[in-house]
Image (spheres, coloured by chain):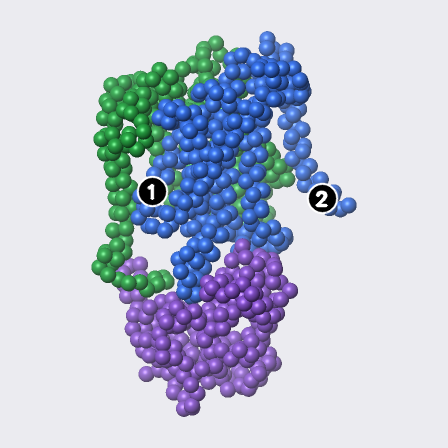
């Protein structure tokens, strides 16, 4: 059995029970991308899914997002299935690449989900303005994506995900293509936004330090087959500042996470 | 491999998803459609749709008959057209490639020069063909020869532009740092050309040919209208229509289509063979 | 001041090329002058062409050479434009249909390839005889010639959309209409215009060609008439020059339209290393010319 039970009265937002994903590869063989994952995620928590490529972390995220149907087990968000949450337009997903529409201005990009949800023009404008302000891009509202740097594009990506006031914020390695300096800045910004908006965040990454710095808990996934090897509590104080990375406690946690990782087959 | 998004799986969908079935579908559907059109044609329903008669649009059976009866004549005309198209294509491609090499070696002048070539490309064939016919009036005393030269010139000019653009891209659009790599070996410009640029350009040559082959056939056909000597599939189409011999005209039309299809088919086969071994630099 | 200099330097090679070509032309014309009986038939001097363009001497039906060319041009071009419009709209719709229905795509795609392979221009006479009316046939041919590049280009655009854009829309539970209007159609606009740029000169060429088959006053008719010396040979040369210009211009016109419709392309930072955007542009052009 995997997963650590924490005794407290926090409200459980997402229950993942025995989740598994098996699919057929090009030769028709069964590949177990994920198997037997049990995980409870609390409301308002910032939790990371950490692991190397191929350990199933993105698969897990996509199943919570209803972008994939599991072949085993279940996911519940509150008492609803991911499908219902998605159809209710309550999901906020930040993909790895910004996925911005080149032909729309930054502001119009942020308004995209609002258009799909048929918000009125004035309302959309109001929301997108406040989102852009939250990520610090108000000055660039009328620019086009190809005028922005990678880091700024990701901010737009985040602003757009938040525009729909989602219950859940799912982030799939959003900063992995950025340089260290930009990444650190965005970490700080993300934590501030999280504090302000109180969302539940599931953050996928392959960077141990990033996971420990940002999260309340780190779920370590290992490959072959993809499984949850362990969950590490990160009890560093909040708000987290960059200099916490120099503390002994931080590095202890990083080591602990690393040791939880179990790189071989079962 | 990324698993597919979920979808309702009933039996029909599952059958449909099988890759073999899909491959077969790609083949079967168009063939069925084509057969349907042929049936409509033979039974004159097509004529009702297009408001024509069997005189202007003869039945497929009749066309086939005419083709087999006149096979010799048709083939000799086909030969004339194909000769023009192929020679013009070859000459144009070679010249075009040479121009591209020059442009790649002398970049600033080359880029502007290609702009001029682009301008030439936009000259309609219908203007080009008569000019060529005029220019070649003194090339030879044999009308047949004169016409051939004129037509080949037209096709050549049309093919040059196409090949030079694509070849230029092939010679200059290299993977990042490839040029840096060569210069770190202190390779000369010539060596870089031969070892890096030319091999890199091979796929682009085929991109050019995919457009150039059909267009050389079209240019050959159109230039036949303006040539002195009455030979070639395109010319025959026109002559036969003028004489209201529609069945013969259609026979030549079928021949023209076949020329286009077969030449393109050969191109695809060659491309398949050459590109299999080829890896971009 | 600096900007001005930069622009001149940019255009300098092009200007020099134009001069070189003009010089070669003149040399050719002089050679021809000496060696031929009727040099104007083969290669007149540039100034002679210019002279003919501006002369006010009537060459036929009481109009000057220039007037003659321009009035026939009007006829030819307007019909080419109609055919072009029809071909564009139907090409776009066809691409949509092929994207919406896999079955439609499978049936139609090989025939699209066949249209590319067979010489439509060569079939002009037959289309004329089927439709019986020169105007209709002009429009039909221009439409067919436009149809192919527009349909394949737009379809290539539709198929080039990254999976993630679909995922994004899926996560918003967007319906099909939203996806088509917000993603597919805007994304394919550059591809669409690439198709238009290719189709425009072709539609014009087709229209002129049909003129030559049956005389009723278009540019092509004028062309054959002046070739047969029913009127001054300079009319012929004027048509050639005019034809060339119109061909180039129509393509550039499409380029201008594209510029109008794609404001996001106007802001390109220079001097960067290749970005995702540049790769996309290259992929697009490649994708299109492979057209399959």
Image: A146 above or below C49:
below
How far apart marks 2 and 1 lie (CA) works out to 50 Å
Q: Please tell me whether residue B169 is drawn above or below residue C244 in the rendered image.
A: below
Q: Which residue is mark 1?
A: C108
Which tint was used for chain A? purple
Q: The N terminus of chain A lies in which quarter of the figure?
A: bottom left
Q: How far from the left and from the top, in percent, is residue B74? A: 31, 20
Q: Position of residue A93 (x, y in %)?
A: 46, 69
Q: Name the subunit of mark 1.
A: C
Q: Which mark is residue C6?
A: 2
Q: Which quadrant of the rendered structure holds the C terminus of chain A? A: bottom left
In front here: C196 or B254? C196
Left or right side of A47 for C4: right
Residue B148, numbered circle: none
Sequence-wise, the earlier of marks 2 and 1 is 2
| Residue visible at 57% across and 83% down in the picture | A239
Chain drawn blue in the picture = C
- Mark 2 Cα-neighbour bin, 10 Å: few <14, some 14–19, many ≥20: few
User: At x 33% / y 79%, what residue is drawn?
Assistant: A17
* Residue A18 image offset from top left, x and y in percent: 31, 78
Under circle 1, the secondary element is helix
Whether residue A7 is visible, yes or no, is yes
Chain B's colour is green
Q: Image check: B122 left or right of C46?
A: left
């Amino acid at each position: 059995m995997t997963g650590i039970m924490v005794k407290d009265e926090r409200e459980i937002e997402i229950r993942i029970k025995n989740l598994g994903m098996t699919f057929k590869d090009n030769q028709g063989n069964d590949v177990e991308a994920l198997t037997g994952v049990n995980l409870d995620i609390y409301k308002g928590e910032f939790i990371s899914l950490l692991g190397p490529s191929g350990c199933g972390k993105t698969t897990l995220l996509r199943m919570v997002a209803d972008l994939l149907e599991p072949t085993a087990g279940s996911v519940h968000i509150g008492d609803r299935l991911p499908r219902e949450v998605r159809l209710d337009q309550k999901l906020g997903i930040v993909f790895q690449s910004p996925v911005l529409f080149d032909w729309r201005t930054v502001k119009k990009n942020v308004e995209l989900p609002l258009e799909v949800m048929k918000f009125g023009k004035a309302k959309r404008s109001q929301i997108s303005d406040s989102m852009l302000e939250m990520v610090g891009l108000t000055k660039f509202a009328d620019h086009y994506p190809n005028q922005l740097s990678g880091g700024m594009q990701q901010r737009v990506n985040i602003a757009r995900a938040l525009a729909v006031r989602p219950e859940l914020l799912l982030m799939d390695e959003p900063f992995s293509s950025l340089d260290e300096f930009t990444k650190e800045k965005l970490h700080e910004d993300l934590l501030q936004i999280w504090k302000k908006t109180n969302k539940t965040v599931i953050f996928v990454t392959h960077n141990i330090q990033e996971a420990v710095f940002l999260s309340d808990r780190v779920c370590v996934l290992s490959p072959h087959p993809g499984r949850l090897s362990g969950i590490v509590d990160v009890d560093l104080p909040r708000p987290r500042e960059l200099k916490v990375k120099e503390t002994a406690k931080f590095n202890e946690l990083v080591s602990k996470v690393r040791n939880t990782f179990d790189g071989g087959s079962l | 491999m990324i698993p597919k998004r979920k979808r309702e799986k009933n039996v029909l969908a599952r059958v449909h998803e099988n890759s073999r079935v899909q491959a077969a579908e790609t083949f079967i559907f168009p063939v069925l459609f084509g057969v349907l059109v042929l049936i409509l044609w033979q039974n004159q329903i097509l004529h009702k749709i297009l408001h024509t008669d069997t005189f202007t649009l003869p039945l497929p059976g009749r066309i086939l008959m005419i083709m087999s009866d006149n096979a010799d004549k048709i083939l000799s005309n086909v030969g004339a057209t194909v000769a023009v198209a192929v020679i013009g294509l070859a000459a144009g491609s070679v010249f075009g490639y040479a121009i591209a090499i020059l442009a790649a070696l002398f970049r600033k002048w080359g880029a502007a020069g290609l702009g001029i070539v682009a301008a030439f490309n936009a000259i309609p064939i219908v203007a080009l063909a008569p000019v060529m016919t005029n220019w070649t009036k003194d090339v030879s005393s044999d009308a047949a020869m004169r016409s051939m030269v004129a037509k080949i010139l037209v096709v050549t000019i049309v093919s040059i532009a196409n090949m030079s653009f694509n070849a230029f891209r092939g010679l200059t659009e290299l993977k990042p740092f490839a040029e840096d790599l060569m210069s770190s070996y202190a390779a000369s410009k010539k060596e870089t050309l031969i070892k890096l640029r030319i091999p890199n350009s091979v796929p682009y040559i085929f991109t050019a040919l995919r457009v150039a082959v059909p267009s050389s056939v079209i240019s050959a056909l159109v230039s036949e209208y303006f040539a002195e000597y009455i030979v070639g599939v395109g010319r025959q189409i026109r002559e036969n229509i003028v004489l209201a011999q529609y069945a013969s005209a259609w026979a030549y039309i079928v021949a023209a289509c076949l020329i286009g299809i077969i030449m393109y088919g050969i191109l695809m086969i060659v491309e398949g063979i050459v590109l299999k071994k080829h890896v971009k630099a | 001041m600096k900007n001005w200099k930069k622009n001149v330097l940019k255009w300098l090679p092009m200007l020099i090329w134009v001069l070189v070509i003009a010089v070669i032309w003149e040399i050719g014309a002089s050679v021809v002058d000496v060696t031929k009986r009727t040099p104007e038939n083969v290669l007149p001097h540039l100034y002679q062409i210019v002279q003919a363009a501006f002369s006010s001497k009537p060459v036929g039906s009481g109009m000057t050479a220039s007037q003659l060319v321009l009035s026939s041009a009007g006829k030819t071009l307007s019909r080419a434009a109609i055919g072009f419009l029809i071909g564009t709209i139907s090409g776009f719709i066809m691409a949509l249909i092929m994207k919406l229905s896999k079955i439609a795509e499978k049936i139609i795609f090989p025939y699209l390839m066949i249209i590319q392979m067979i010489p439509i221009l060569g079939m002009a006479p037959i289309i004329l005889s089927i439709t019986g009316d020169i105007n209709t046939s002009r429009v039909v041919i221009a439409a067919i010639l436009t149809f192919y590049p527009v349909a394949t280009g737009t379809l290539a655009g539709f198929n080039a959309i990254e999976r993630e854009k679909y995922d994004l829309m899926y996560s918003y539970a967007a319906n099909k209409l939203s996806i088509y209007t917000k993603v597919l159609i805007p994304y394919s606009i550059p591809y669409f215009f690439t198709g238009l740029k290719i189709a425009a000169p072709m539609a014009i060429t087709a229209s002129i060609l049909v003129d030559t088959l049956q005389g009723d006053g278009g540019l092509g008719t004028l062309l054959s008439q002046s070739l047969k010396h029913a009127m001054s040979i300079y009319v012929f040369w004027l048509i050639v020059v005019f034809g060339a210009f119109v061909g180039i211009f129509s393509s550039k016109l499409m380029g201008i339209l594209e510029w109008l419709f794609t404001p996001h392309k106007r802001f390109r930072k220079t001097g960067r290393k290749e970005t995702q955007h540049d790769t996309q542009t290259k992929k697009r052009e490649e994708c299109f010319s492979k057209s399959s």
